[in-house]
Image (cartoon, helix red, strand yellow):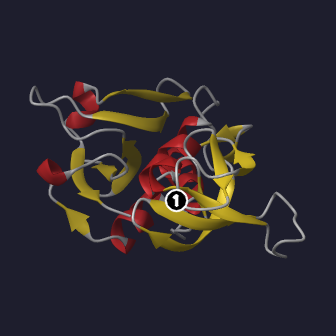
Amino acid sequence: MTTVNQPTFVVAEPAPDAEHETEVVPGEEVVVLKTQGEWAYVVVPSHASSKDERGYPGWLPTDALATSVDTLLAKARTYLGVPYVWGGTTDAGIDCSGLVFRAAEAIGVRLPRDARDQAVALDPIGLDDVTAGDLYFFARPDGRVMHVAIATAPPAPDGTRPMIHADGDKMLVVEEPMAPDRLATLVSAARL
């Protein structure tokens, strides 16, 4: 399943002037059954219909479909301002690896629960190759990974690395540029 990233009508035929069937809203799930050029034939499971037992069927523009990165970041951002709680995985309190665990879950990726295990489970990428949705890993001086964050954009030309993470110092989930003290402990990156 995927989600839509903008309000859009599901239409009867793959054409801009086709008859509207139903409307979907950002975050609503659809199942893509096939694509045809710039159109996707979908069913909308939350819209029951006698036309298809799986959900309301029809066409929508492919640019209305959220990418997995959009979905990952949208899920992570639902935790902004949530208190940092060691071992937490809910909006009542969450830690850094719990945030990554829940965000990855939203795109159908099953990860280990702890940051050090997440780092081992994924293939590393170069720090200069990071794009939005990739993971940053941070380690203690002994090399043991102790923190993870999600990149929200590629590194900027000035070296700024935007990210979202459950910050144990601020005791909140925040979206911010990587601070110099974090940068000093950055050891690797990986792509989901």
User: Residue 125: where, in percent of width, then height?
Assistant: 20, 62
Image quarter hosting the C terminus: bottom left
Would residue 171 appear left or right of 167 to someone viewing this image? right
Residue 94 showing in the rendered view: yes
Q: Which residue is drawn at 58% across and 45% down?
A: 75
The residue type indicated by label 1 comes to Ala
Image quarter hosting the N terminus: bottom right
Tag 1 residue: 104
Q: How many marks?
A: 1
Neighbourhood count class around disc 1 (C-alpha, 10 Å): few under 14, some 14–19, many 20 upward: many
Would residue 57 appear left or right of 122 to someone viewing this image? right
User: Residue 76: where, in percent of width, then height?
Assistant: 54, 42
User: Foreground: 56 or 181?
Assistant: 56
User: Foreground: 132 or 125?
Assistant: 132
Residue 142 showing in the rendered view: no
Per the image, label 1 sits on a secondary structure element best described as helix
Residue extending furthest left?
157
Q: Is residue 137 above or below residue 151?
A: below
Q: Which residue is drawn at 46% across and 47% down?
A: 70
Would residue 47 appear left or right of 25 to someone viewing this image? right
User: Foreground: 77 or 111?
Assistant: 77
Residue 58 picture quarter? bottom right
User: Residue 25: where, in percent of width, then height?
Assistant: 68, 41
Q: Which residue is drawn at 57% across and 30% down?
A: 80
Residue 60 picture quarter? bottom right
User: Foreground: 49 or 164?
Assistant: 49
User: Residue 77: where, in percent of width, then height?
Assistant: 55, 36
Q: Residue at x 83, y 58 (%)?
A: 47
